[in-house]
Image (tube, rainbow, N blue to C red):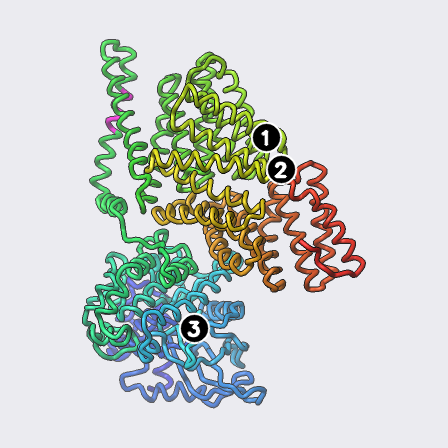
Amino acid sequence: MNAETWEQLKSLFHSALEVDESHRAAFLDQACEGNAELHSRIERLLVSHEEAGSFLVSPALHGSGINPLADGDDDERAVHEKTRVGQRIGPYEIIREIGRGGMGTVYLATRADQTFDRQVALKLIKRGMDSDAIIKRFVMERQILANLDHSNIARLIDGGTTEDGLPYFVMEYIEGKTITRYCDEHTLNTLARLKLFGQVCAAVQFAHRNLVVHRDLKPSNIIVTEDGTPKLLDFGIAKLLSSQTPVEATATIGRVLTPEYASPEELRGLPVTTSSDVYSLGVVLYELLSGHRPFNFDNRSPEDVARKIVTSQPIKPSVVITRIEAASQTNEDEGHSRTPEAIGRTREGNVERLRRRLAGDLDNILLKALRKEPERRYASVQEFAEDLRRHLEGLPVLARSDTLSYRTGKFISRHKPGVAAVVVVLLTLLSATIVTSWQARVARRERAKAERRFKDLRSLTNSFLFDFHDAIADLNGATKAREMVVKKAQEYLDSLAHEAGEDRELLWELSTAYLKLGDVQGRPGFSRTGDTGSALQSYEKSLDTRRRLVSLEPNSAQYQLGLAITLSRFGPLFQVLGKPSAAVERMREATAITDKLLPGSRDLTTYQTATRNSAFLGDALSEMGNYDEALAMYQKCLSLAEQNRAPFPDIAVKHRFAVCRERLGFIFTIKGDWQKSLDNHLEMLALEEELSALEPTNLDYARAEATAFDHVGDAYRGLRNYPKALENGRRGLAMYEEFLKQDPQNARGTKDVGDCSHHVAETLLASGDSRGALTLLQRTVSIRRELVALDATNVEYPDDLAESLMLSGESLIASGNPMKAIESFQEARAIREPIISAHRERIDYRRGLARLYTDLGDALVVLKSQNEAELWYRKGLDLWNELQDQHALWAKEVAMPQEVADDLSRVRSGELQKRSP
């Protein structure tokens, strides 16, 4: 091919790229003017451009069977290579080409100035591909690599611009094999492959933490060196999640992802998130373990690949290993057929042993990573890797097979027209009933009939929305179904509210329904979903409706009690939202109502509501540091519970009495009376054990029993009886673990496990076992990170995380690692300081920050850092003095202001010695 023909080919190719695909064929017919060879060459270039998986280090379109410079064009390739081989680019001399994609070429190079004697990989845009869009993406890739300094990511060494204005960058040259070939050639078993894959996950998670989505994860972009170190390559089509760095849509510069490893949402043109990388990693691991990709394609066309991935379900890896694939269907490193025998031999020795190894957990883990819906995959690469770790350690995994409720939901989504028709019928019935009811005001004879129909339809709808929800509430994997019911319930209630007028019966139903809806969405201690923001909105609607009922009928005990019940929901909710003063305000109003209703009342609900209100008011007062009034409220709670026991020999009354004992135990913990704390918690434990025996299927009583064990352990720790503390704490933790195993999506259950494991770690540290504490805290911190990601409005979640990070730091100091401790303390500080800024009234948050500043001072004293230690002791002392002035210190903290003042004085005098505990 001469230069003139090449220029014509290049010009037409770029022009064709600018033409919409639907008009491209007609454009080529006209532009090529009957030149079939020219037409064919441009078509091959366009296909190459579309199907190229990357433009970093992969061989040019390897495995696709398409190469625009092949088919007799050796002279063209030689001309191309000759233009760069031996040439100097900056201080580097080109040795040879080592990889090519649709837009860029990678060369093996070395430093020509002898600064260092090491081969490098130099990446350069091809001549003719230097459009503004491609250069922009190229420069962005260079910047991405500059920000990613990780041992498992190919490192950026240098960068610059050629004399003719083309940007380039230089990376470390990775000699190795793709991860699939490396594993097969070394006959790594499943365990070894999973451990190797874990390092890959760490690299991808590091990129995600730096707001980078790779978008082209596949075996050829994961190279394993001879010493077994995996290296992640090719961020050529990576996406920055940071809003400060705009990224053009991929469509503007050609589709460059590799379809076989792309997620369904990518292939459908939807926004790409970290979940897309989770999916691609799932495909890579599927191939590593089973020897096959998840889908068997009829042909290799992009359309067929995309259709299969978007519409088909992957086969279980333990089943797919029995499949035989021809060479054209196998992975990009192989050129031969894949048989069950060959796959089994390179992994577990034989196919049956491999099948048993994959069946169960690994099947479920891989299928979870490969789910079509991003929200049903692992929430992060870290969670994916963590589930693999659980499997390796023989622990329960998060992944579960699809449930009946989910499959039912999918059936509905596949038959939307039919379901929509049913909904239309129901809505038509509802509308017709309302219209009939309105007309019946005029036609007296028809009124009773219309009202009956309206009530029947309301009853039917309420039954579906709430009874159905309760029926599936304890089903594992029913989270999505519950969310669907909640969504439909909210829509139904909001529409019904417009029809209520002054219909008191309907208003009462609405207020009760909104109350229950809020409970389902985010009632603290009860909700499985943890959506506190939505719960607050529903409770406000219930409150508004019940205030309206009281205004319509001020002397109604039913409406007054209903108002008090709704008000009581705001106490715990405002606490988790970091608003204790608002909680106190609502709970004082609720308590005032029940105090008026109690005299002469024989109603169990009234007594239970009054008991609960006293406890919740005590909780809110305690969080504001008003411990004496909180104690008075808890004593009132216990008194009311005792009054309930005689006239109402109900099992629920015993539970309420046990809860009051729990509150009293807590306030005695604050006051430092550990024996009274233990006595109250032991009584709570005895009551809850009795209740669990009476109703063994009642999960609330079982959870309360676990809570009692946890609190008894805390009290024994306060008394320095560490064996008893560990015995009880571990019993509580084992119970919580079992509950969470039965319902892994339960937000409350997750928090319970995190809280109890933190308390056991506190006991381990207090008993001198700092290493045991650190081991347990690793999981505690992981759990609490999950909760922070679950609900951003719940300020207790990040504060809990900060507390565990602090305890980790204290354990690290005890283990002789103050530098690592400071890292943990600083992360906790980054969490806690913003919380305090937004929630100054939360005394417990300020107490936590005071302890954190003091811990930082202690760690810096160990490191002999006088100035920094002085800074943090001074900050801590300011907070301790502030808390002391407000009488908000716990008994165990009363001496802290003086102790920290003494520490500060010693540091200022140059005496860098940590005080004795």
Main secondary structure of the magenta stretch = helix
Give the extent of the magenta segment: 428-435
Q: Which residue is mark 1?
A: 631
Residue at position x 30%, y 39% from top? 472
Vertical arrangement, residue 291 with respect to residue 685, above or below: below
Circle 1 — which element?
Answer: helix
Q: Which residue is mark 2?
A: 671
Q: Gap between marks 1 and 2, in whole Å?
A: 10 Å
Residue at position x 68%, y 64% from top? 863
Give the crowd class for mark 3: few <14, some 14-19, many >=20 residues within 10 Å: many
Q: Nearer the viewer, residue 587 or 551?
A: 587
Q: Which residue is mark 3?
A: 233
Give the crowd class for mark 2: few <14, some 14-19, many >=20 residues within 10 Å: some
Image position, residue 254 (x, y; %): 37, 66
Tell me the mark number nearer the camera, choosing from 2 and 3: 2
Circle 2 — which element?
Answer: loop
Q: Nearer the viewer, residue 278 or 4?
A: 278
Q: Identity of the amino acid at label 1?
A: Leu
Image position, residue 267 (x, y; %): 32, 60
Whether label 2 touches label 3, CB < 8 Å: no
Image position, residue 717 (x, y; %): 56, 47
Tell me, yes or no, whether the highlighted magenta stretch contains residue 433.
yes
Q: Gap between marks 1 and 3, in whole Å?
A: 62 Å
Q: Identity of the amino acid at label 3?
A: Leu
